[in-house]
Image: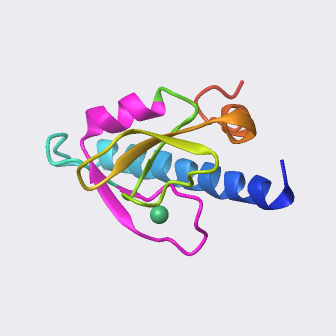
Amino acid sequence: MSDREARKGENEAWFREVNERLEDRAVEGRGFDPDAGLEIVCECSREECTERITVPLAEYERVRSSPVAFIVRPGHAEQAYERVLAGGGSYEIVEKVGDAGAAARVEDPRTAS
Ligand SMILES: [Zn+2]
């Protein structure tokens, strides 16, 4: 993996952690409506991207159950090392492949020992 690709992986891992905290706060807060969805930040690898995405909580949980799956804005997937699993709405679910996938597995906050 090149340095550039490694940095991009870190960026996505970072946003995943940010979103985990947003989820905790939303679910713990009073008046959270799971049907209304969870507002997260786009988990793409563009450092300058600060777009927000609203996803149903169940969908977020499903994506998070995979260490290599991320939620991004349509068109934000990196064709070189991400595969779009699902999309069509206001967001796409992508899966990292190859070295990027391996790095995402290592950094997964939900499988950290
Ligand atoms: Zn993005």
The vertical placement of 57 against 54, above or below, is above
Judging depth in this view, the residue of 48 and 17 nearest the camera is: 48
Judging depth in this view, the residue of 76 and 109 nearest the camera is: 76
Is 54 one of the magenta-colored residues? yes
What count of labels does the image hold?
0
- Split into 4 quadrants, where in the image is the C terminus? top right
| Residue at image location 54% in from the left, 48% down from the top | 16
Name the colour scheme.
rainbow
Give how far across and how far down residue 85 sits, in percent. 41, 36
Is 57 one of the magenta-colored residues? yes
| Residue at image location 47% in from the left, 42% down from the top | 94
Residue 48 appears in which quarter of the rendering?
bottom right
**44 displayed left or right of 111:** left
Q: Residue furthest front?
A: 80
Q: Residue furthest bottom?
A: 48
Judging depth in this view, the residue of 8 and 25 nearest the camera is: 8
Give how far across and how far down residue 101 sits, in percent. 66, 36
**95 displayed left or right of 62:** right
In the rendered structure, which segment of residues is drawn in magenta? Answer: 40-64
Residue 107 appears in which quarter of the rendering?
top right
Residue 54 appears in which quarter of the rendering?
bottom left
**81 displayed left or right of 61:** right
| Residue at image location 73% in from the left, 39% down from the top | 103
Give how far across and how far down residue 42 sits, in percent. 44, 59
Give how far across and how far down residue 19 sits, in percent. 46, 51
